[in-house]
């Protein structure tokens, strides 16, 4: 299974369905199942954003760090300037849609009831066999 890391609160926002696209400075040709990992680092600017958003989304109060929190399908990668006019205010607030960036569309998001610890890495990376099995067992129990 492949994965990529997002800083909190963005990882949980994807897992909870608050955010449907992840913006990056680089494109990808990858399509398929991907695990969403919440980075261990939680910089001050991200904490401040999370504090503001927790007023609207109280489920963001307790954010896991260093864990795989969800699995989804990455179905599309588009340049942000082609998307920005069509997106909701909430989606725009949760991403960096400045020119020259890319947006990954994340669909069929399945929240893990028990986040799975993993170190994480930059870009896309492979989830170790043991952690992949933990994730697959959870998804099977949920019927996903």
Image (cartoon, helix red, strand yellow):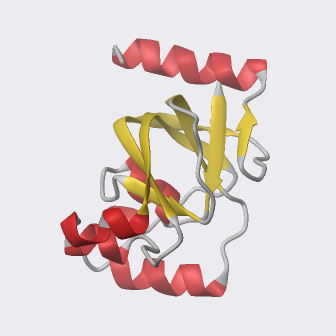
- Residue 121, how many percent across, how many down? 78, 49
Q: Position of residue 142 (x, y in %)?
A: 36, 19
Please provide percent x and percent y for residue 66: 70, 52
Q: Quadrant of the C terminus?
A: top left
Give the left or right position of residue 13, taking residue 39 as reference: left
Residue under the image location 53 percent in, 71 percent down = 100
Q: Is residue 88 left or right of residue 37?
A: left
Residue drawn 78% across and 26% down? 128
- In the rendered image, the vertical position of residue 92 relative to residue 105, given as above or below: below
Seen at 35% across and 50% down, the residue is 16
> Relative to the observer, which residue lies in front, 77 or 111?
77
Specify whether 71 is left or right of 55: right
User: In the rendered image, which quarter is residue 55 located in?
Assistant: bottom left
Residue 35 in sight in this render? yes
Q: How many marks can you see?
A: 0
Which residue appears at 65% of the width and 16% of the height? Answer: 133
Q: Quadrant of the N terminus?
A: top right
Measured from the top left, where is residue 136 in percent x and y?
Answer: 55, 17
Residue 143, relative to residue 6: is it above or below?
above
Q: In the figure, 20 relative to 42: above or below?
A: above
Up-down: is 99 above or below 16?
below
Residue 57 appears in the picture as rendered: no
């Amino acid at each position: 299974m492949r994965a990529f890391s997002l800083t909190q609160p963005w990882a949980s926002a994807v897992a909870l369905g608050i955010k449907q696209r992840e913006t990056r400075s680089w494109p990808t040709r990858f399509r398929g199942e991907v695990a969403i990992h919440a980075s261990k680092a939680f910089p001050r600017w991200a904490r401040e954003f999370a504090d503001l958003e927790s007023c609207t989304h109280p489920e963001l109060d307790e954010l896991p760090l260093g864990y795989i929190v969800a699995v989804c399908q990455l179905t599309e990668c588009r340049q942000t300037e082609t998307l920005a006019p069509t997106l909701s205010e909430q989606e725009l607030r949760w991403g960096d849609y400045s020119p020259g960036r890319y947006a990954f569309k994340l669909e069929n998001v399945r929240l893990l009831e028990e986040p799975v610890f993993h170190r994480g890495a930059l870009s896309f990376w492979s989830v170790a066999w043991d952690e992949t099995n933990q994730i697959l067992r959870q998804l099977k129990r949920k019927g996903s």
